[in-house]
Image (tube, rainbow, N blue to C red):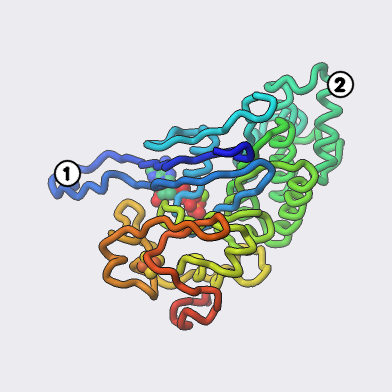
């Protein structure tokens, strides 16, 4: 652990168990539950944005909930080393759906003031109201909006309110789980721009989750790629795009149109995503990997460190820097 480490995940796993039916028990078809997060080790450093990408169901939100303390890992440890002043880090989350994450019976002032009151960051109603007004302006709304209710706002405006509420808690760490994917394409870029400005101005440390590589490319300093609960590659944003080391990363890059941050234009990658309750043996990606060999089907690949401090999990050191390494059939364009 170094002084710059902010958040450290050490071999973290999360299994969702479920009750089996009688037939399943008789057939002994127990999967042991869904291992939504499997042996993930990861470090987020002070002041950086760590991006997490992967297809639907790969365990991104589960990891976000574990980091946020909303649930405990089945095994492994998650630690926030104390900051320089010895204080405990404060964490806030921004979720995907700005419709369900705001209480419709509260005014915007009540909603944004709550973390200020809980953490006793201002005292007296005048000071709290002044802070609420300041935050509303900071996220591109106006002080007059404080009197209104969530139903009076569009999706994009509601997400701005969620961001204001998160900032109101003066967090050291922000967890953003698909913060723009429920929004209209036209407002996604506005919210991303707002988040980028805030990152820059407030020097926040954050975990930014998305299934869109184009989004994470502009938002994150480093990126972790998840596949069926495992972290299969981790690198700086620049390196990940210039020199991906895992075939899945290469396929994700090829599936994300350049600089297109809208979620509708993503192309699915070839092959069906296996059921996370029954992950393939050996390398979990072998059923979709054009480079799979016998060893991939039987043996889980080791985690290999790269020269530049990243890592990947593959039996081979493949040169994937060229987009043409995959035959066109490896990618499927959405009609
Ligand atoms: N509360 C739960 N109980 C049982 N299984 C769950 C639960 N939450 C998630 N899962 C399963 O765990 C796996 C990972 O889910 P998770 O929501 O973390 O994925 P995700 O990467 O966030 O997906 P998405 O991109 O669709 O949001 C999935 O197979 C999902 O069905
Ligand atoms: S270990 Fe084998 S199947 Fe897995 S990514 Fe590498 S080449 Fe593909
Ligand atoms: Mg999710």
User: Splitting the image into 4 quarters, where does residue 160 fall?
Assistant: top right
Q: Is residue 2 left or right of residue 328?
A: right
Other residues around mark 1 within 10 Å, as few (<14) / some (14–19) / many (≥20): few
Residue 235 % position (x, y): 56, 58
Please name the residue shown 77% across and 46% down the image: 198
Please name the residue shown 29% across and 54% down the image: 278
User: Splitting the image into 4 quarters, where does residue 18 fall?
Assistant: top left
Name, please, the residue furthest toward the top.
124
Under tag 2, what secondary structure? helix
Name the mark on residue 126: 2
Residue 127 % position (x, y): 85, 22
| Above or below, comparing residue 322 to residue 283 in the picture | below
Residue 40 % position (x, y): 44, 47
- The answer to whether marks 1 and 2 mark residues whose Cβ atoms lie closer than 8 Å is no
User: Where ligand 2 lies, by image quadrant?
Assistant: bottom left
Q: Quadrant of the N terminus?
A: top right
Q: Is residue 4 left or right of residue 250?
A: right
Name, please, the residue furthest toward the front.
307
Q: Which residue is mark 1?
A: 25
Foreground of the two, 292 or 141: 292
Other residues around mark 2 within 10 Å, as few (<14) / some (14–19) / many (≥20): few
Please name the residue shown 61% across and 54% down the image: 222
Under tag 1, what secondary structure? helix
Question: Is residue 104 something that shows in the picture?
Answer: yes
């Amino acid at each position: 652990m170094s002084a710059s480490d902010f958040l450290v995940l050490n071999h973290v796993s999360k299994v969702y168990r479920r009750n089996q039916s009688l037939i399943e028990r008789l057939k002994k078809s127990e999967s042991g539950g869904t291992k939504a997060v499997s042996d993930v080790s990861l470090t987020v450093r002070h002041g950086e944005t760590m991006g997490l990408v992967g297809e639907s169901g790969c365990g991104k939100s589960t990891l976000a909930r574990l980091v946020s303390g909303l649930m405990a890992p089945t095994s492994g440890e998650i630690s926030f080393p104390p900051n320089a002043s010895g204080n405990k880090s404060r964490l806030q989350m921004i979720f995907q759906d700005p419709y369900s994450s705001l209480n419709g019976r509260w005014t915007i002032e009540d909603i944004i003031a709550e973390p200020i009151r809980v953490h006793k960051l201002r005292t007296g109603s005048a000071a709290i109201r002044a802070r609420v007004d300041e935050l509303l302006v900071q996220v591109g709304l106006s002080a007059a909006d404080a009197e209104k209710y969530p139903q009076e706002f569009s999706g994009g405006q509601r997400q701005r309110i969620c961001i204001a509420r998160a900032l109101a808690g003066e967090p050291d760490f922000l967890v953003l789980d698909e913060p723009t994917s429920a929004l209209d394409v036209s407002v996604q870029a506005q919210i991303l721009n707002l988040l980028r400005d805030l990152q820059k101005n407030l020097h926040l440390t954050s975990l930014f989750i998305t299934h869109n590589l184009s989004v994470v490319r502009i938002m994150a300093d480093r990126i972790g790629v998840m596949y069926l609960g495992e972290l299969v590659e981790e690198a700086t944003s620049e390196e990940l795009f210039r020199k991906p080391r895992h075939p899945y990363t290469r396929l994700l890059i090829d599936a994300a149109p350049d600089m297109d941050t809208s979620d509708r234009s993503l192309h699915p990658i070839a092959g069906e995503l296996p059921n996370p309750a029954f992950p393939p043996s050996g390398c979990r990606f072998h059923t979709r990997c054009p480079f799979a060999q016998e060893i991939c089907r039987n043996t889980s690949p080791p985690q290999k460190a790269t020269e530049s401090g990243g890592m990947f999990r593959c039996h081979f050191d493949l040169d994937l820097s060229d987009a043409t390494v995959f035959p066109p059939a490896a990618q499927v364009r959405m009609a």
